[in-house]
Amino acid sequence: MTDKAKEAYSALMARSKEMFVIGSAGGILHWDMETKMPPAAQAMRGEQLSALELIVHKKLTDPENDALLMICEGDIDPFDQIERRNLHLLRKSYDESSKIPDKLVTETALHQSKCNMVWKKAKAAKDFGMFRDDLGKMIELRKQAADILMDVKGTRTPYDALLDQFEPNMTAERIDEVFKEMREGLIKLMDKVLSSDTKPDLSVLERKVPVDVQRRVSSDAMAFIGYDTTSPEAGGRLDETEHPFTTGSFDDVRITTHYYEDRFFSSLFSVMHEGGHALYDQGIPREWMYQPVGTPCSYGIHESQSRFVENIVGRSPEFLNYALPRFRKFSPRSFKGLKNKDIIAAANAVNPSKIRVEADEVTYALHVIVRFEIEKDIFAGKVSVDELPQLWNQKYSDYLGVKIENDAEGVLQDTHWSGGAFGYFPSYALGNIYSGMFLDKMQKDVPQWRKGVRGGDFAPVLQWLRTNVHSKGDLYDPADLIKAVTGKEITVAPFLKYLERKMSKIYGF
Amino acid sequence: MTDKAKEAYSALMARSKEMFVIGSAGGILHWDMETKMPPAAQAMRGEQLSALELIVHKKLTDPENDALLMICEGDIDPFDQIERRNLHLLRKSYDESSKIPDKLVTETALHQSKCNMVWKKAKAAKDFGMFRDDLGKMIELRKQAADILMDVKGTRTPYDALLDQFEPNMTAERIDEVFKEMREGLIKLMDKVLSSDTKPDLSVLERKVPVDVQRRVSSDAMAFIGYDTTSPEAGGRLDETEHPFTTGSFDDVRITTHYYEDRFFSSLFSVMHEGGHALYDQGIPREWMYQPVGTPCSYGIHESQSRFVENIVGRSPEFLNYALPRFRKFSPRSFKGLKNKDIIAAANAVNPSKIRVEADEVTYALHVIVRFEIEKDIFAGKVSVDELPQLWNQKYSDYLGVKIENDAEGVLQDTHWSGGAFGYFPSYALGNIYSGMFLDKMQKDVPQWRKGVRGGDFAPVLQWLRTNVHSKGDLYDPADLIKAVTGKEITVAPFLKYLERKMSKIYGF
């Protein structure tokens, strides 16, 4: 490697570090805004966040980056795999950010705030008509960006360019194939479950569990998965917000949950879900800190980690049989008279519903598929804004067999579109699919893992996730990571097999 | 005003806003570090804070500021008082920051971390010898800065340049005069108190008050002074740290306190003290937000506000007679058998002690005077580092009549010097003096204020502070503010009169 290329690479890594550090400072301000900030501070916080974003944006789009990248790219052979990946990721983010005109960036940011506000009002009023124009404008703005990004990224369609932001190198065509298979498989499984004679008693989920007991349960669950919030070396913490989330990286990764007396499992599984995200963020190799490769792979892979911990482990009979006796000790009264078996059935109940965030493991992906199909049609110009509610309701009827009564429980239920985050939804279902593939491989590598969990030992699972997923950072695009770990192309079969196996035991088919 | 000057001024205000916004983001990161941050995040937080400081430093020392300032200064007549003040303050901070070489800034910052670490160890070991060399180097570094700042600021001595950072335009000569008078007055008053037959029963301060009761007391105290942490428009919050502090500005001003079961008054008076700081930070005129004039006047004026609320109001018989019956209701057992009179006497006990932060209202300033006199000698080259412990102990014996047994309770007790903050200490005692002068004037303007407090009404006091102090922001240097408010030069008499009056009633002399 020439000295010039070496120096250019070092300069790029220093720039990457600056962006990462300032970006992570913004992350803390976001966390504070959601958890601790006095309400009056909203406007000032907006100024602070914009200022930091602007600094990072300027650093990212600095033409000097292009010059430095070209020096390295002109002498690429001596760079190793990791260095090349860093250069690829920087090139990609530089090209994408610098090609979108500042005017479009600003206009989109301004419209995001407005559109989100209008969406909230429209949802409260259950009236899509109120949201129509602003959603239309948001779609228009994202189309403009997608057209530009399509050229930069070289994707086949504008929508693929949007997908690529969340799931690099993924295409609607590929997603179509796997989602079709998943839709059919899940509907078949859902029908089996619904026609089973076993009907879990859902009222057990509504048993009142005092909030302070739920807090002890949260601590216990965090200790179980190895997410440390208490030791003098802890890099995590748990707070309370209406909508649980995870934020941060490396030595400072924070999660939140919510507590409702009559929804005990909501806090437990939120902690497991966000804990799964957090373990991933903490598990990226430290030697890659501040480098592009030292970040998570994709939204879908991230979601696979949270779902792995929440669903595959957390809702497994093995975990629940281990954990429930412990929870009983914290509050004998709350669980009095309940059998583990009934709790496990209730925690794995399948009920086609109208609301995505309340959906169970079997029906969840069907909600996502509805959204993906609609987004694809929007960006292919096959559906107008006015047709969205009707299309939404039709698909809910077709796939989930539920009748949407109003826009609030229909097309207005999610915030994503109001923020212009088209292409985000598929990650959720891809997360399910990936988690199934990881499980399949882990089952072969660590056949005793269920026995471990039954005895309270999550370490072998975490070890497997660390080695196979976390330690890979952003070294691969998601499909390549899946291939590297499992040796296979993306396939729905393992996820369906996993669900079929669990549900058949619980529902006896 | 020419268009060019107008434009230059607008550009400077935009730059001021940027610095303020990024600086305040750093403030949130600091707060988080002290209150919520997972311990493992320390190193990353250091990176984040340095990055933001560097950004602000670069913006402040940008030579373009000089050019813009010169345009305005060349056409100064049409600018009004506030605009001129903004230009003066920007000029001052630009000149000072740009004249100190980057090398010295970096070296000082690095030595601050090291020196603070060594100080902690030396204090734990009660061994000044361990700290000697690093303190010597810190003094050397600050002397270099002070020599440069003396030229920039045009002060008579290097130490005056350091003082000016905390108390603009204040000189050691002027402080000498008022401190001499204060020292004599306080020692006289202390002797009167100590020779009185009234001996407050200090054990009443150690009555156990459960922490949750203390939390209710804190809420009650915050509600009394009008520091809002609970409404949907709240701009404040209360958290817990070992050392209480206040941080923030305008719509986001946060305080902390600590709770010890057997030190009830420590949490109450911490909340009142920090609350006094917070009310000041919240009370700066909103129309000056993001401008240099939209900041507090000085460290001393800030301290006058905290002491006003904590001591003049909080320790007054009127407030305690109002508040104690309320506190009794929160926890009848904690206060059982205690008379208000005895609690008031204990809360105003005078005891010459060795530790500044535990000192009472009468002896507190004597601790500060010791430090001021020593600092002055250090920067006049009249005392060597090796002589500091001996000099310290001698002054404690002379002024406070206490015998220092080891360096931890002597010269090593405070963190300030390890951070190079020479010139900071006088602000504390100036705060006392200012608070006395404000009281004197308020007594004339609002003669019924004590009656109001006795009935639970703090509003007239807050109104007076808002109108006379908070609303002035940084429009004046502290001595000029005092003059504008009270019509007088800085004088110790009102503070001494206030203390004499209160103590004579309690101690019967």
Image (tube, coloured by chain):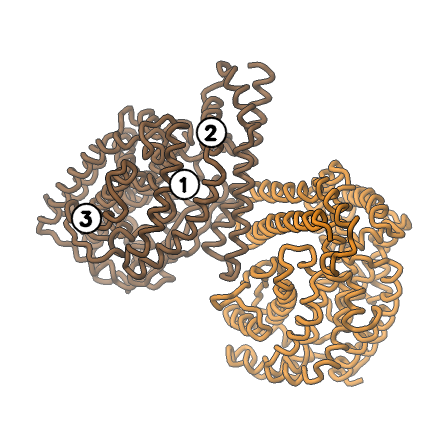
Chain colours: A orange, B brown
Answer with mark 3 or mark 1, whichever residue precedes in sequence.
Answer: 1
| Amino acid carrying mark 3 in the image | Tyr
Question: Is A146 on the left-hand or right-hand side of B71?
Answer: right
Which chain does the residue under circle 3 lie in?
Answer: B
Residue at left 41%, top 43%?
Answer: B278
- Label 3, residues with CA under 10 Å away: few <14, some 14-19, many ≥20: many
B237 w.r.t. B170: above or below: below
Which chain does the residue under circle 1 lie in?
Answer: B
- Disc 3 is placed on an element classified as helix
- Disc 2 is placed on an element classified as helix
A66 or A377: nearer the viewer: A66
Which of the numbered marks, if any, corresponds to residue B95? Answer: 2
Answer with mark 1 or mark 2, whichever residue precedes in sequence.
Answer: 2
Residue that label 1 marks: B279
Q: Nearer the viewer, mark 1 or mark 2?
A: 2
Spatial CA distance of label 1 from label 2 is: 31 Å
Q: x and y percent of residue A231 in the render?
A: 48, 68
Residue at left 47%, top 26%?
Answer: B91
Question: Is B104 on the left-hand or right-hand side of B398?
Answer: right
Task: Please tell me in which quadrant of the rendered image residue A344 appears.
Answer: bottom right
Residue that label 3 marks: B396
B151 w.r.t. B134: above or below: above
Which chain does the residue under circle 2 lie in?
Answer: B
Question: Is A412 on the left-hand or right-hand side of A268?
Answer: right
| Amino acid carrying mark 1 in the image | Leu
